[in-house]
Image: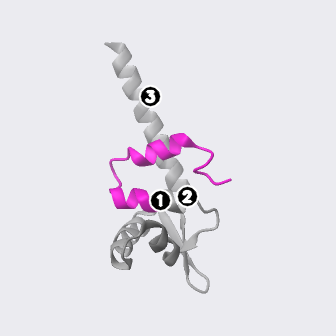
Amino acid sequence: MTLLETNNLLLEAINNSKILSTGQKKIIINLLQFDKGVPISVLIELMGQSKQALYFNVKKLLARGFITREKEMVFIYKVNKEKILELLESYMQFQKAKTFTFTKK
């Protein structure tokens, strides 16, 4: 069972994130479906995007630490679980603050 399958709140946090583009969100969600990571060719097939369009967002996510890559026979991409859990924690804090502000009035 993957991290995404066990946590609907995580999916909500990713989809509502203001710091990720739509393309970046889709990449993260697709990568979360795999525990061991996948080569870029799998992402291209899953997402139906050109290699160039996908690489643009992959490079941004690598630079920001949301995903990692390891060299095996080809590069294997996977989510940086620590960074994703930080995103989830920020989302939960935001929801808590929003609820507190709303009920305080």
Applied colour scheme: one colour
The residue pinned by badge 2 equals 32
Q: Find out whether the residues at labels 1 and 2 contact each other: C-beta distance under 8 Å.
A: yes
Callout 3 amino acid: Lys
Closer to us: 9 or 41: 41
Closer to us: 68 or 10: 10
Please indicate whether residue 86 sits to the left or right of residue 50 in the image: right
Residue visible at 55% across and 58% down in the picture: 32
Closer to us: 9 or 81: 9
Question: What's the distance in space between the residues labelled 2 and 3, CA to CA?
Answer: 25 Å
Specify whether residue 37 is painted magenta. Answer: no
Closer to us: 22 or 59: 22
What segment is highlighted magenta in the picture?
Answer: 1-28
The residue pinned by badge 3 equals 96
Up/down of 8 relative to 69, above or below: above
Callout 1 amino acid: Ile
Residue at the top extreme, as displayed: 105
The residue pinned by badge 1 equals 28
The crowding category of the residue bearing disc 3, from other C-alpha atoms within 10 Å (few below 14, some 14 to 19, many at least 20), is few
Compare marks 2 and 3 and give the one earlier in the sequence. Answer: 2
Callout 2 amino acid: Leu
